Amino acid sequence: MKEVWTSLASIMGVFAFFQSILHAVFPPELRFAVAKLFHRLFQCFSTYCYFDITEMDGVNTNELYHAVQLYLSRSASMAASRLSLSRGLNSSAFTFGLANNDRLVDSFRGASATWEHAVTQRQSQTFSWRPVPEEKRSFTLRIKKKDKTLLLPAYLDHIMETATELRRRNQDRLLYTNSRGGSMESRGFPWESVPFKHPSTFDTLAMDPARKELILADLNDFAQGKAFYEKTGRAWKRGYLLYGPPGTGKSSMIAAMANYLGYDIYDLELTEVRTNSELRKLLMKTTSKSIIVIEDIDCSVSLTNRSSKKPTPPCEPPSDLRPAGGTEDGGGAASTMTLSGLLNFTDGLWSCCGSERIFVFTTNHIEKLDPALVRSGRMDMHVFMSYCSFQALTILMKNYLGWEDGEQSDELMRELAEVVDEAEITPADVSEILIKNRRRGRREAAAELLEALKARVDRRKKERKGSLSEQVVVEEEEEQEKRALESPKESTGQLMHSCNAKEDKGAEED
Ligand SMILES: Nc1ncnc2c1ncn2[C@@H]1O[C@H](COP(=O)(O)OP(=O)(O)OP(=O)(O)O)[C@@H](O)[C@H]1O
Ligand SMILES: [Mg+2]
């Protein structure tokens, strides 16, 4: 070991000696040329190649630098020992970064890539109209020469994509509304937005776990389906129709979807939209990775069916020659909003002016919807939000009472399981009962819920009996009418008989 150190020291000494001779004898230009030559020689024999990614590209900021910074922040939090921490504007997440001269090894498609972060002080401030940072920051990427074709540019594309996704996820979600009534703001944007902070998630959503899994799998397939949609020539969008009684969680499901995928929501108020072209403008101003929602589609506006267009009176010019209100999009009047306009909104060529978008319609009355609106391809998945099942009930008890899985096997739960289906109660009503009683303790709150369910079952039974007896009376009357029609003589006789009887009775009274 000692010999190694001695020989190393002697090599360094020789190197220093030659350097001092170089400095004394040769002019700086020559020294620079020699250094360059050495550098080239070193590069020829090295198995690595290096790429510098500086923060500033001239006076412009280098987008790739910030993308790398964000990309590395994912693994930096795990691997590095000293990190820089930051939090961006409008962001609720912290970003980790590599500290000065820290290194991190990443891998892509089986090849490894080493990143080093360098921070140096800027030597002299050159004049610039834009403020230039005092520090010079850069990342150096080191990869093996043999991996160059494998990694470039695919690895850099991957970094850019991941960074964009991370940036989007770190930003707060936004909820947009068109309640401005068609008027635009100063920048010509028809939507108004507020931060979206709805706490609903698929964990808190009370519904049958199997159906929940189905929806989650569908959402995952959609979000990761870029290649599939391209390959099959389909627009990258998906439609969901959520239907069911009020208070069964349709709006909560939309919020859970947005939180799960990290998408913004555009809540389209159809009653505020006057024309098809206005609807199209709204669509054009939505962004990718968003959910476009139309709530209560059956009662938003009265949409005329395409097939029930009135024929043009002979005295009027053909519709396509009329100056205003002429048909467009193959059927919808431009001066009003029509079903045709809405169908084009979800399914026509314009619906593809962005990508990765989900359309969600909700309704309490699916039977009232025009079949054209709910056909598959337009609304790909129909989700029935039903009354509270026992499984949904246990989720709500977990949410509101902190009820654990093991606690659910006792007598009380068995009774709850027996009555919940018959009670036909919405998750909203169950939530209300649990919220009211949550301070009284879990068991008491559950007992209260059981009482409420039993009372509801009794009431429903009575109502059913009442309506049954009403139905019997109606049926009897109908039967009598039928008999009267079938044998008019007999019934006339009966009628006469009853009239005579009445007359007799009246005479007796006189
Ligand atoms: N399936 C559910 N899971 C969890 N909570 C629910 C569920 N359904 C309803 N709730 C609770 O009830 C409230 C109302 O639910 P929500 O607004 O989602 O119902 P909805 O089906 O959209 O009703 P509407 O048809 O009247 O719009 C929510 O704030 C939520 O707390
Ligand atoms: Mg709702």
Image (cartoon, grey):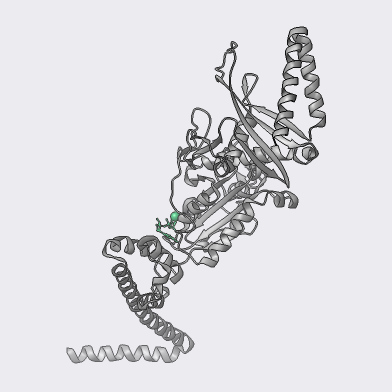
* Residue extending farthest front: 2
For the point 46% across and 69% down, the residue is 391
Residue at screen point 52% across, 62% down:
366
Q: Position of residue 21 (x, y in %)?
A: 76, 11
Q: Is residue 452 visible?
A: yes
Quarter-of-image position of residue 31: top right
Q: Residue at x 52, y 59 (%)?
A: 242
Q: Quadrant of the N terminus?
A: top right
Residue closest to the eye, 284 or 114: 114
Q: Residue 411 falls in which quadrant of the image?
A: bottom left
Q: Is residue 326 left or right of residue 433?
A: right
Vertical comparison of 208 with 102: above or below? below
Residue 458 vs residue 52, the one in the foreground: 52
Query: Which is more toward the observer, 356 or 152?
Result: 152
- Residue 194: x and y in percent read 44, 39
Residue 301, image x, y percentages: 49, 50
Report the image quarter containing ligand 1: bottom left
